[in-house]
Image: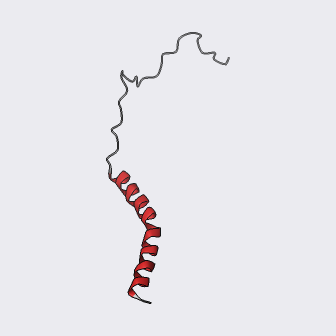
């Protein structure tokens, strides 16, 4: 194999992987970006049980 043939073979091998390498680097860039902060809901949260309004509980007869 001559230097010219070796160069052509090397370019062919590297050229076929350029797109795959670019995809890998793009994925790495996306992973390195910090995540967007979570948005907080407006208002308040009630941590108590809701009051039981309406009918009274039916108790079985003893």
Q: Position of residue 39 (x, y in %)?
A: 35, 32
In the rendered view, tell whether residue 21 sits above or below residue 44. below
Q: Position of residue 18 (x, y in %)?
A: 42, 65
Position of residue 14 in the picture relative to residue 53 (left or right): left
Q: Residue at x 67, y 19 (%)?
A: 60
Q: Position of residue 29 (x, y in %)?
A: 35, 54
Corner quadrant of residue 10: bottom left
**Quadrant occupied by the C terminus:** top right
Residue furthest to the bottom in view is 1
Q: Position of residue 46 (x, y in %)?
A: 40, 22
Q: Residue at x 37, y 59 (%)?
A: 25
Q: Residue at x 53, y 11 (%)?
A: 53
**Quadrant occupied by the N terminus:** bottom left
Total count of labels:
0
Which residue is nearer to you in this view: 31 or 60?
A: 31
In the rendered view, tell whether residue 4 sits above or below residue 20. below
In the rendered view, tell whether residue 5 sits above or below residue 42. below
**Coloring scheme used:** secondary structure
Corner quadrant of residue 26: bottom left
In the rendered view, tell whether residue 3 sits above or below residue 22. below
Corner quadrant of residue 8: bottom left
Which residue is nearer to you in this view: 7 or 43?
A: 7
Which residue is nearer to you in this view: 62 or 16?
A: 16
Q: Residue at x 48, y 19 (%)?
A: 50
Which residue is nearer to you in this view: 62 or 30?
A: 30
Residue furthest to the top in view is 54
């Amino acid at each position: 194999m001559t230097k010219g043939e070796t160069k052509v073979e090397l370019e062919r091998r590297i050229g076929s992987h350029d797109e795959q390498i670019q995809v890998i680097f793009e994925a790495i860039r996306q992973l390195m970006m910090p995540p967007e902060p979570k948005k907080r809901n407006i208002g308040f949260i009630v941590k108590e049980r809701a009051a039981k309004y309406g009918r009274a509980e039916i108790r079985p007869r003893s």
